Structures are given as C-alpha cells and as structure tokens.
Image: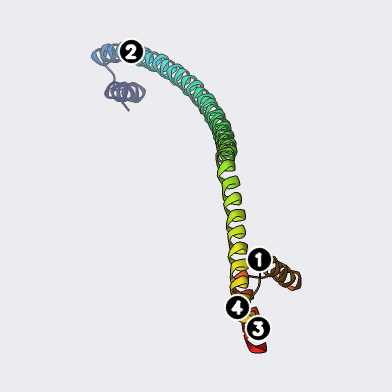
Amino acid sequence: MGLVAGLVLLVEHSLRAGRVNGSNRELLKELEEQRTDIDAMAFGKLLLAKNALKDVQKELGEQKKAAEEASGAYDAASHKCESMRAQVEADQERELTDKIYDWKETIFQEVRRREEQLDDSKQDWETQLKPQREQIAQLKALLQSHRIDLAKTEVSRVMHRVLGKANEAEAAAFFRRIIDITFTEPFTLTRAVAARLNGRK
C-alpha cells in the first residue's frame, strides 16, 4: 500500500473516531487530491504499459509470422535443393552412361578398324609371298627331281658294281620297279637294295 493511501486511511479513521479538526480535513482533502492524481498517473502508466504490451505482442506476432515465413522459405529452398541435387545426380549418371557407351563404341570401332587393317595387311603379304611360295614349290620339285636322279645314279652304280654290267635303260627299269613296290626315301631305298644284292651275290 502506498504512503498517500495509508495517510488517507489514517485520516478517515480519525474522522470516524471524532478526532478530526479543520487542519485534518484540509489534509484529508489534499490527500484525496493527491490520491486522485496518483491514481490518474498510475492509470496513465498502466495504459502506457498496456499499449506498450500490445505493441510488443504485435511485434512478436510479426516476428513469429516472419519466422514462420522464413521457415517455410527454408523448407521450400531445402526441397528445391534436394530436387536439384537429385536432378544433378541423374544428369551425371546419364552423362556417365553416355560416355561409357561412347567409349565402348570407340573401342569397338578401333578394334574393327585394326582387324580390317590386319586383313588388308594379310592380303598384301599373301600377294607379296605368292611368287616366293611358287618359287619354293618349284625348288622343292627341282630338289625332288635331283634326289630322284641321284637315286637313279646310285642304283646304276650299285648294279654296275654288283652285276658287273647294266646300261641306263636297265637301271631305269630297275629303279621304276623299286618305286612301284615302295618309295620312302631314295638313298635309304638304294642302300637296302644294294645290301640285298650284295647278299645275293
């Protein structure tokens, strides 16, 4: 309780007790006026405080609304970022898949090109080696002919040594008969014939 209000109660109690004089009445009146002023002042302060509270509440409401809007904007931005991230990952995966396909296609084409080059090179080598192969075949045939001639000579020599006489026609006929029986290798064959002839002699 305030000081003025206490004094007012004290004076009123004195008035009820019959102990009030003129000065007390004046004091009571003054105190009543002061109390009225104090009440008006308190009411004004209370009104100001109430208005200030309303302003604070309004500001808090605006801040809350701004915070909610900011939260909504943050959620929207987060969702957008997540969507963009997923899109970027999908684009990167698709790009990587395309690159892998391109690499495989490039490698396949390169391998195919090299195979074609090898085929062309093989054909070129075949063309270049054809005369040499023909020459080798001719040399083999010539070698075989020389070996046959040597075998004939060897047979003729053996016949001359074993039989004492034999002309070229007899030696050739004898050699042909040997070939009709078997022919593996002329020199080996003539040695075997010579051995048999020597044994018979």
Query: What's the mark number on residue 191?
Result: 4
In 3D space, how far apart are the residues under numbered discs 3 and 1 (Cα atoms)? 18 Å
Query: Label 2 to label 4, Cα distance in Å?
Result: 156 Å
State which quadrant residue 89 falls in.
top right
N-term-proximal mark, 4 vs 3: 4
Q: Residues within 10 Å of mark 1 (few under 14, many from 20)?
A: few
Q: Residue at 66% x, 72% y: name it.
A: 166
How many residues crowd mark 2 within 10 Å: few (<14), some (14–19), many (20+)? few
Name which of mark 1 and mark 4 comes first in the sequence: 1
CA distance separating discs 4 and 3: 10 Å
Q: Which is nearer the N-term, disc 1 or disc 2?
A: 2
Instruction: Decide which of 56, 173 is in the foreground and name it.
Output: 173
Vertical placement of residue 176 versus 27, above or below: below
Image quadrant of residue 86? top right
Give, as a three-letter code, the residue at label 2: Met
Which residue corresponds to mark 3?
A: 197
